[in-house]
Amino acid sequence: MTRLLVVHHTPSPGTREMLERVVAGAGDPDIEGVDVVARPALSATVSDFLAADGYVFGTPANFGYMSGALKHFFDTVYYPSLDAVRGRPFALYVHGNNDTVGASAAVLKLTTGLALEQVAPVLEVTGDVGARDREACYDLGGTVAASLMG
Ligand SMILES: Cc1cc2nc3c(=O)[nH]c(=O)nc-3n(C[C@H](O)[C@H](O)[C@H](O)COP(=O)(O)O)c2cc1C
């Protein structure tokens, strides 16, 4: 069994909706042999990170950057995991009111440093989370989970 870890900061109903659709997509019935684990960014540990085979990161945009919670997660895991997670697949979703560019760029700098492999375009949603956004979240989760199937 391979493991997909969803590390997220979810402070609102909108971000909750995105998280739920990502997790649902990762658990699509067509995907077999992938265990999906979701952890709030403030509680995810180095062990969680190392024990997973692939990742979805989810964050709101806060002051033009990723949330402090997701930043705390990367602060915690970065050096202890360097080299150990190289090549593992990941995807990223970001929610904001009007500008998610800085938040996405900040996460991608860290995933580049960790040498993770991006397997889907960053999913950026601003404002209300609509039907298409929910579908895109589902697809995002499914894409990363499918990349882990043997
Ligand atoms: C402290 C703070 C800073 C924020 N900074 C940004 C920002 O730089 N860009 C942006 O698009 N939204 C920003 N927002 C909005 C959040 O991204 C938004 O509240 C979050 O994605 C949840 O959205 P929702 O309540 O519509 O679900 C900020 C919100 C807070 C509380």
Image (cartoon, grey):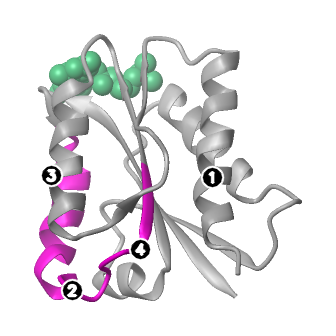
Q: Are marks 3 and 2 in contact (CB under 8 Å)?
A: no
Marker disc for residue 83: 2
- Residue 109: which disc? 3
Amino acid type at mark 4: Arg
* Distance from Cα at disc 2 to Cα at disc 1: 24 Å
Q: Tell me which residue sits at (37%, 47%) in the image.
A: 9
Residue 59 as seen in the image, left or right of residue 130: left
Q: Is residue 92 above or below residue 98?
A: below
Left/right placement of residue 96 relative to residue 115 reads right
Identify residue type, mark 2: Asp
- Mark 3 or mark 4: name the one nearer the start of the chain: 4
Residue 124 picture location, percent across and down: 41, 27
Magenta-colored span: 66-91
- Please, is residue 61 above or below residue 21 in the view? above
Residue identifier under label 4: 88
Q: Position of residue 92 (x, y in %)?
A: 40, 46
Please tell me which residue lies in front, 35 or 148: 148
Q: Residue at x 17, y 82 (%)?
A: 82
Residue contact at pointers 1 and 4, CB within 8 angstroms: no
Mark 2 vs 4: CB contact within 8 A: no
Q: Which mark is residue 143?
A: 1
Residue drawn at (82%, 73%) of the image: 32
Marked residue nearer the N-terminal end (2 or 1): 2
